[in-house]
Image (spheres, helix red, strand yellow):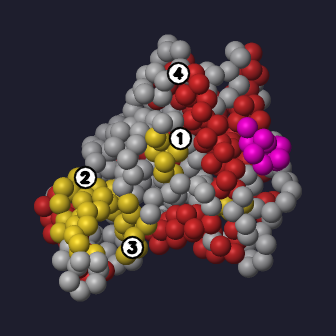
Amino acid sequence: MSSEKTTGDQDFSEVARPVASRTDPAELAARLQAWLGTKLPAGADPQVTDVQVPAANGMSNETVLFDALWNEDGQQRHHYLVARIAPAPTGVPIFPSYNIGQQFDVIKTVGEHSSVPVPRVYWSEASPEALGGEFFVMERVDGLVPPDVMPYNFGSWLSEGSEEDRRRLQDASVRMLADLHAIPEPAQLFPSLRDDLGSVAVTADAALRAHVDGQRRYYEWAVESGPRVPLIERGLDWLDAHRPTPAGPAVLCWGDSRVGNVIYRDFEPAAVLDWEMAALGPREIDLGWMIFQHRFFEDLATMAGLPGLPDFLRRDDVASTYHEHTGHTAADLDFYTLYAALRHAIIMFRVQSRAVAFGQAEAPADPDDMILHRKTLEDMLAGTYWNRIDSEGAA
């Protein structure tokens, strides 16, 4: 849920804005310039200009865009950069923790061990002194992002592209997941993602159990100061009753594997963003999330009386393309798409709780109504959702 994109961010600009020292461009420029002076060699003479704080900041990591010039090899070079800052606890953050150093390490390691396009990362700063929170700095990548507001399937450069263009983007995005999942020995390359999974090879089954347990902890944290949510609790119980036992080793999962977190050029991925949900797990965690996130927008389009993009990111097409590139047959997609819907429900509940806390919304009488895709999740739990979608020819 990134904001380094130039278009398509979800507008939470009026909810829990960060303190002035983190939003005033002049002050940020001075702070960043002083900080760069501690990171660059003597004589680099850094200068920071054109600081921008995107209006959609605050949903996840806060973001600052800036230009920086410094001397390298006797020449002054121009760098287009992004700082991703951990949100302040007073801003009612969406997640209980933001491991900035881990995000930095994941992006760097993915870039070193795969063909997945990620931004170049420069520095990770653990001290909050410079910007009021931990942060890391990476390059800014030009391109187009499928927008969230309004959703790309409501009308956007993506929906206005040709069917062939959309299929190229879809196939390239699935291929990118295949390349990510092919990174060898992820438990060794990404030790911070192992948690309690041990130091040896991690199985997909053990990683899935740990992942689901983590979602339970996330839910309990999200409801600490608010109402409990019966629909989410039903979903968590359903997971326990229906959790599969995936075979083979765990892979690196991006975690937030949706096209809205990718910068595209000519309908091909140019940079994969937003790694705060990265984890070890079965491949289907990413596949299910990618499929569900599009279905989430498709269901909104149906509610709005719009045609949407029913031929885009269809479940069988995604699974087939993934199989072509990996030889892996995606299994239990009913489970993994429901799991994605449930994970998204906890996030949506937290987003709405945040809006209520800052006076942007009123709490409904029924906490289930705080989940925007309530009916989708209810239908999935009832086992009727995909039958309906199949009958409409959109699965």
Disc on the earlier residue, 1 or 4? 4
Q: Position of residue 216 (x, y in %)?
A: 64, 56
**Residue, disc 1:** 268
Amino acid, disc 3: Trp
Quick one: quadrant of the C terminus?
A: top right
> How far apart are the alpha carbons under marks 2 and 3?
19 Å
Quadrant of residue 86 in the image? bottom left
**Distance of label 3 from label 1 (alpha carbons):** 27 Å
Q: Residue placed farthest to the left in the image?
A: 26
Q: Nearer the viewer, residue 309 or 214?
A: 309
Residue where numbered disc 3 is placed? 123
Secondary structure beneath disc 1?
strand
Query: Comparing marks 4 and 2, which lies closer to the viewer?
Result: 4
Pointer 4: what residue?
162
Find the distance from the CA under tag 1 to the CA under tag 4. Answer: 14 Å
Residue found at the far bottom of this picture? 42
Marks 2, 1: nearer the viewer:
1
Find the magenta span and give its range: 321-331
Residue 134 falls left or right of residue 184: left
**Amino acid residing under circle 2:** Val
Which element is circle 3 on?
strand
